[in-house]
């Protein structure tokens, strides 16, 4: 190879050889610079498909502009051979520097924090290294660390694995595994997918190796090594390794990912703290006051039990949990939870046997997603917000407007709609979240503009018949649909007017207030617009005006009857300028013919001097028969109907402004689901107890009230 | 150089209830001193700064009696034996 020209690179010397291929020094004859050129071994070489994947991965990795990451310039193919062109890094690997006795602790801290910085950058970009090890971390003569081979391990498959990995390969299905065995996290050995925290485990191994000169988990065979990784504790490191460094390593090497640092930036900070002489604890909950769950004292709790019916009420000053039985006549009030916080989104998740209440909280200390598994007695209080924009997004989280549990067959999937408008998804029951890039990188995004409440993605509608199709709505951006599970999104606003724009019928930019779908008719969607009431019968391709006989087509909330797909409810307000119930009469409007006509429902609601506003998520239905409908007002009143809207009773008043209402039936049968959304998914087919014909009594007077804040 | 942080009530959940955190050895720049505080009490970080590393809009940090927004922001150079207070702004309805 020496002297040959590959592409526009002239090979000048051989640098080394590894499992993946041979690395040469080469000269870029176009840009006149020295580069490293790695020629992928033919027997390690990817097939045509993985070739493409490798190219994609390299493109992603090439975006990792960071002083501690070796930059990939190019991946190309010549005469059937794949080669990778990258920054030429001259120096020694951490493996070589560590020798058999390890590095001085100051060096471990200095190099370790740089490696952590590199990982933090990559993780923010959504790239996991998957094969971090001392042999692919190089320190140059200035002490600058360069992490090599970012993003390459994922796509190149098991054939690049070295040493004991090969013997390990015979005992496992390696099709989903890449990496080097000694650095593999326990969860990968269990067959679980790698995530950021698997890299943090590998960093712990590297730190140990650098400090001690040997690996923490050793063995003669792959089986012995993997067994040690899974079960054994590393041999403690004493002087000269400072206790703070040992504490950081221990926490990196926690067997359970949840017990490790959750982000590389935390490790970087911890290593820097040790450099400054601070005390670091291996136990995240010990002397750091690491509150993960807050038990609330001095707050009255509703004593919820199986068979109860629950209303979740989010307000601008906290959350409330109202408990009743299936009769829904008497209510016990729990709360307020999160004093003074905006709670714009709540949800109940009964999938997989859970009884979990989700709530978003927002105040000047930031926005958090929390949950309670004991109906409000204790709530998570994560040290770090699990929903956060990556640093390259250039924006920061302002509020969480919507929490939507995934479909029943995906019990660990959750979605959140946030402000500024973006969609986040979790696939591990809310433990970790990622930004849905397909939507965030949509070319329309720069032209979405904030509505009155901010630039919010406030509605998420899942198609129960197709787990790749879903809809989101943005104020002001419009309706977007994906049909490939979130990879790509199309604006679906044909027929929806934007009265506030010069072009009244733009492709996007509409100020959608809410959309709703009935699960048995996923092709049909109802939509309440900022001026305009619409229905689509073709998955959002076209919308037609259905404001037939309503006093105003301005409003916020719209819900669909849980069993009758032709039936929907709205609460019109007078106008954009005067967002109060029309003529001072609080009336719910119902259609039972898909919007061909609407009827007012006002019995029991105030009809004089009732200038009320009901916001987009402040109306919900239960799944009893007859169905209960509930809504809350900005003035803090909570109304309910037990007979599908024919008559209404006040459940509570004196609340702060109500911004969210959700319903939940706490099933005796773990498998039974609830109505987590305004249009309860699948509720038409689920079994809920009937409230029976005789239970027609009015709601009992409110048992507890609060003065408005 | 020692530095003393005054912790507001809402964040004491993350300091084991302590009102004051004193670091015997601290870097001389406010952002570095805060990073040290975050590493010891990680819950504080997200409550004080956002994902972009900016101090939250309605949070103020005082070095002595001066709001750091007027002394160089997070790059403020700490005086000897500084007292740093984290204070939510007086705002809201």
Image (cartoon, rainbow, N blue to C red):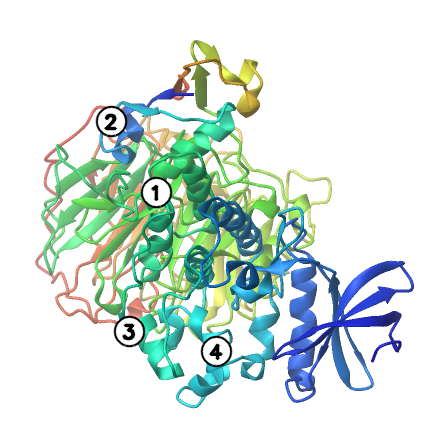
What residue sits 58% from the left and 18% below the top?
A: B72
Q: Which residue is mark 3?
A: A685
Q: Which residue is mark 4?
A: A177
Q: Which residue is mark 2?
A: B18
Q: Position of residue A35 (x, y in %)?
A: 79, 63
Q: CA distance from mark 2 to mark 1?
A: 16 Å
Q: Please rate how many residues cluster around mark 1, counting C-alpha atoms within 10 Å: few if below 14, some from 14 to 19, many from 20.
A: many
Q: Position of residue A112 (x, y in %)?
A: 50, 50
Both on one chain, marks 1 and 3? yes
Q: Quadrant of the N terminus of chain A?
A: bottom right
**Callout 1: chain:** A
Residue A682 placement: quadrant: bottom left
Q: Please rate how many residues cluster around mark 2, counting C-alpha atoms within 10 Å: few if below 14, some from 14 to 19, many from 20.
A: some
Label 2's element? loop
Query: Mark 1 or 3 closer to N-term?
Result: 1
Q: CA distance from mark 3 to mark 2?
A: 53 Å
Q: Please rate how many residues cluster around mark 4, counting C-alpha atoms within 10 Å: few if below 14, some from 14 to 19, many from 20.
A: many
Label 3's element? helix
Q: Position of residue A480 (x, y in %)?
A: 58, 58
Q: Nearer the viewer, residue A680 or A68?
A: A68
- Compared to residue A320, the image places residue A82 above or below, namely below
Both on one chain, marks 3 and 2? no
Q: Quadrant of the C terminus of chain A?
A: top left
Decide if residue A612 is in sight here. Answer: yes
Q: Tell me if A32 is positioned left or right of A693 in this view.
A: right
């Amino acid at each position: 190879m020496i002297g040959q020209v590959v592409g526009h690179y002239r090979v000048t010397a051989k640098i080394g050889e590894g499992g993946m291929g041979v690395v040469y020094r080469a000269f870029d004859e176009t840009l006149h610079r020295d580069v490293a050129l790695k020629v992928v071994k033919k027997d390690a070489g990817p097939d045509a498909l993985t070739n493409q994947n490798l190219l994609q991965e390299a493109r992603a990795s090439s975006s990792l502009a960071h002083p501690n990451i070796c930059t990939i310039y190019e991946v190309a193919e010549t005469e059937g051979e794949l080669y990778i062109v990258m920054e030429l890094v001259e120096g020694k690997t951490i493996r070589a520097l560590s020798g058999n006795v390890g590095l001085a602790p100051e060096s471990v801290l200095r190099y370790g924090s740089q490696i952590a910085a590199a990982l933090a950058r990559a993780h923010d970009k959504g790239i996991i290294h998957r094969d971090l090890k001392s042999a692919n971390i190089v320190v140059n003569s200035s002490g600058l660390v360069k992490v090599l081979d970012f993003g390459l391990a994922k796509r190149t498959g098991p054939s690049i694995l070295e040493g004991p990995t090969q013997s390990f390969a015979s005992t496992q299905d390696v099709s989903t595994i890449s990496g080097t065995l000694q650095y593999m996290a326990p969860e990968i050995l269990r067959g679980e997918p790698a995530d950021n925290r698997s890299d943090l485990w590998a960093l712990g191994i590297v730190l140990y190796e650098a400090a001690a000169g040997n690996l923490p988990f050793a063995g003669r065979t792959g089986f012995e090594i993997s067994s040690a990784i899974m079960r054994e504790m590393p041999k403690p490191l004493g002087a000269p390794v400072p206790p703070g460094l040992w504490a950081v390593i221990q926490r990196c090497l926690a067997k359970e990912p949840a017990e490790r640092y959750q982000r590389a930036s935390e490790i970087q900070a911890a290593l820097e703290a040790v450099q400054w002489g601070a005390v670091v604890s291996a136990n995240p909950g010990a002397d750091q006051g690491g509150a993960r769950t807050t038990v609330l004292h001095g707050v009255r709790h509703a004593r919820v039990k199986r068979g109860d019916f629950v209303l979740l009420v989010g307000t601008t000053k906290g959350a409330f949990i109202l408990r009743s039985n299936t009769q829904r006549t008497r209510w016990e009030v729990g709360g307020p939870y999160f004093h003074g916080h905006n709670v714009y989104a709540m949800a109940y998740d009964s999938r997989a046997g859970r009884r979990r209440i989700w709530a978003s909280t927002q105040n000047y200390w930031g926005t958090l997603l929390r949950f309670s598994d004991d109906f409000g007695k204790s709530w998570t209080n994560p040290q770090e917000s699990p929903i956060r924009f990556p640093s390259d997004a250039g924006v920061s989280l302002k509020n969480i407007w919507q929490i939507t549990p995934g479909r029943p067959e995906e019990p660990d999937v959750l979605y959140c709609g946030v402000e500024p408008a973006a969609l986040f998804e979790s696939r591990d029951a809310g433990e970790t979240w990622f930004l849905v890039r397909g939507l965030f990188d949509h070319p329309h995004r720069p032209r979405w503009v904030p509505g009155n409440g901010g630039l919010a993605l406030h509605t998420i509608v899942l198609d129960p018949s197709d787990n790749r199709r879903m809809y989101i709505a943005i104020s002001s951006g419009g309706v977007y649909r994906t049909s490939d599970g979130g990879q790509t999104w199309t604006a679906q606003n044909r027929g929806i007017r934007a009265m506030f724009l010069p072009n009244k019928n733009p492709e996007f930019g509409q100020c959608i207030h809410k959309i709703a779908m009935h699960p048995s008719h996923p092709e049909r969607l109802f939509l309440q617009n900022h001026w305009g009431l619409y229905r689509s019968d073709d998955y959002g391709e076209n919308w037609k005006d259905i404001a037939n006989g309503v006093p105003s087509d301005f409003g916020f909330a719209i819900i669909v009857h849980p069993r009758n797909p032709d039936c929907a409810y709205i609460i019109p307000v007078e106008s954009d300028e005067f967002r109060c119930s029309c003529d001072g009469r609080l009336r719910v409007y119902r259609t039972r013919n898909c919007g061909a006509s609407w009827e007012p429902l006002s019995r029991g609601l105030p009809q004089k001097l009732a200038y009320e506003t009901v916001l987009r998520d402040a109306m919900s239905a239960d799944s009893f028969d007859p169905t209960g409908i509930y809504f809350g007002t900005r003035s803090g009143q909570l109304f309910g109907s037990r007979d599908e809207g024919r008559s209404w009773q006040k459940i509570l008043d004196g609340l702060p402004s109500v911004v969210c209402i959700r319903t939940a039936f706490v099933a005796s049968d773990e498998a039974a689901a609830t109505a987590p959304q305004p249009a309860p998914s699948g509720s038409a087919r689920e079994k809920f107890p009937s409230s029976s014909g005789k239970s027609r009594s009015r709601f009992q007077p409110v048992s507890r009230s609060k003065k408005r804040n | 150089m020692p530095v003393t942080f005054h912790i507001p009530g809402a964040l004491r959940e993350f300091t084991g209830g302590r009102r004051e955190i004193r670091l015997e050895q601290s870097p001389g720049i406010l952002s570095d001193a805060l990073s040290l505080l975050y590493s010891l009490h990680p819950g504080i970080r997200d409550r004080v700064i956002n994902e972009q590393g900016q101090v939250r809009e309605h949070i103020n940090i005082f070095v002595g009696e001066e709001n750091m927004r007027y002394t160089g922001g997070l790059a403020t150079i700490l005086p000897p034996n500084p007292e740093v207070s984290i204070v939510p702004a007086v705002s809201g309805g």
